Image (cartoon, rainbow, N blue to C red):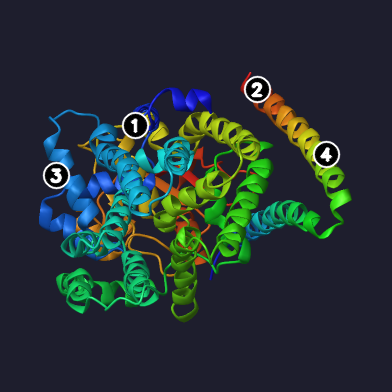
Amino acid sequence: MSLLRRWPFTFWWLLVFEVGTLLRAWQLTGARMWYDEINTWWWASLPIERTIAATAADVHPPLFYLVEWASLRLFPAGTAPELAMRAPSLVLSVLALPLLFLICRALKVSNAVTLGATLIMALSPAQIYYAQEARMYALLQAEVLLALWAVLTRRWWLVALALTAMLYTHNYGIVYAAVLLCLAVGRDVMEDRTLPARAILIGFGVPLLAFVFWYGVLSHQVATVKETWWTQATGLGDFIGPFYGHVFFSSPMGMFIPICQIVAYGLAGFALFKAMQRVRTDCTGLMLAYLILAPMLLAVGIEAVYRPIYLTRALIGVAAPLYMLIAWAITDRVDVAKRAFAWGVFAPLLVVSLLSYYPAELQFKGWGYSGAGPVIDRLQPGDIVYHVNPGSLVQFHYDWQQADTPQYLAPNSPGSLGTLSTGTLQAMGVQQAALESLQWRRAFVVWNAGPNTSLSEDAEMQSLLDRYPHEQIDANELGWQYDVTDGGVWLVWH
Amino acid sequence: MMSHRFYEWLAMLAADNANLLNMALFGLFIVLTWEAIRLWPPSLQTWLRAGVLIIGGVCYVAFTALALYVLVAASL
């Protein structure tokens, strides 16, 4: 403690902020882009109307892709796509640290709690992962934190701005907007204050009005995606997954995983217990517990009436309140010895999971079958590449530099889950055609089958191989301990 | 109709779900054990807490050391 008191709080906070920034920037472009990131890059490189069309025919709102569209054009031509595409997430993830600080100030928690929460956020591998991913989760988190701070400080136009951005970033924005509305109303009711109806109307009515442009698209997405959505029903273990996933992340740390899980759940359980215990004297814990549990429960509620939608990554908005609650529970009005004990158990595991994050990320993002290498080695003039589903086509977009070689995609197979829709593929400029309708002498048929690939596609692929002489030149053998992938590359000729 | 890969994947998800639940129960068990010591006579509480801390500390250090050894061995 004496060391902590020797320099002012601002010094320590800035030090943690600096460390957090460096950890997010380090190895930013080290890992290859994975399937979803390649899609982001592809869509961002299209003319703006086609970027929006590709998004509208998929499952997300367009704001993040527009940010990426701008980012791609702001960086000089020739910049590595990994840098141009991941830079916005990096900036937004760094921005989340001062937003967390502002929320801690608005909640009037002590400097020690503020420092502890910032430290967890700075070191959490989950946060670093989203800071280095060309997807919308760092943006979503920054918007949730900005909206929360604006609600706590009654800046209603800022609430309107943040919620509008949130609704246009991710469909989970609706969940967070509902949770924050209840917080804004509930706080005034509990404090016996007159409800600022006009302010609430600005903060929450304006975003609803602004969202009207996308509402029709969302209705269409909800109706069309329902039958092909890939997530499965949420079990109790999945439900509480964010308590572990947002702190230690799911990197392959081998034997550290169980100990990290036990500590994460133990801490979360203890923190929630303490929040309930303190409810008569201090509402901070209760409010943080609400900000964590309410979005999780609401997501499960929507799942009950629609279909499985529960995703730990989309619940990134509960991460910062979770860090604050843990820091509050093991720091606030806790004597020095117990505080040291709790941090002594927790902090080393956080550091170990952080250290194992970087190699794990390379491994995770490197996972995904491309098959481009064997094709490039054997390519001759006049050859074509034929993809049985969009999986390999998207991977080729990243690995493939042979722009002159025509590539085609088989017409959509019925029954496969989570695949790109026809509307999105059209916006991406993908040529869909049956192999027999094309002019070719030799074709490289690439088939990348995962768990969500239907039997009808397996049958189509088999029928294609029955019709033409062929030779398998590569196999997809990325099955972990389970046999969840299949496929490879076949050279087919007339 | 989905292939065998889909059902293997479901089995994988179910295993993850069960694993998370088991670890959560284990973590909560430790927290509740600590809290439940309050229910014992005051003269025993110090001994019980010391016992839990020593056993927990030994398990934590042993498990962490083993995990570190496995992690380092795997990276060599």
The answer to whether the residue labelled 1 contacts the one labelled 4, judged by CB atoms less than 8 Å apart, is no
User: What amino acid type is highlighted by mark number 4?
Assistant: Ile
Q: How crowded is mark 1: few (under 14 residues within 10 Å), some or many (20 or more)?
A: few
| Residue holding disc 2 | B72
Q: SS for tag 4?
A: helix
Among numbered discs 4 and 2, the one appearing first in the sequence = 4
- In the image, residue A473 sits, relative to residue A67, either above or below, namely above
Query: Label 1, label 2: how many angstroms apart (C-alpha)?
Result: 37 Å
Q: SS for tag 1?
A: helix
Q: Which residue is drawn at 49% across and 60% down?
A: A282
Query: Label 4, label 2: how many angstroms apart (C-alpha)?
Result: 25 Å
| Residue holding disc 1 | A10
| Residue holding disc 4 | B55
The outermost residue toward the top is B76
- In the displayed structure image, the side of residue A161 where residue A342 appears, left or right: right
Q: Do the dots labelled 1 and 2 sit on one chain?
A: no
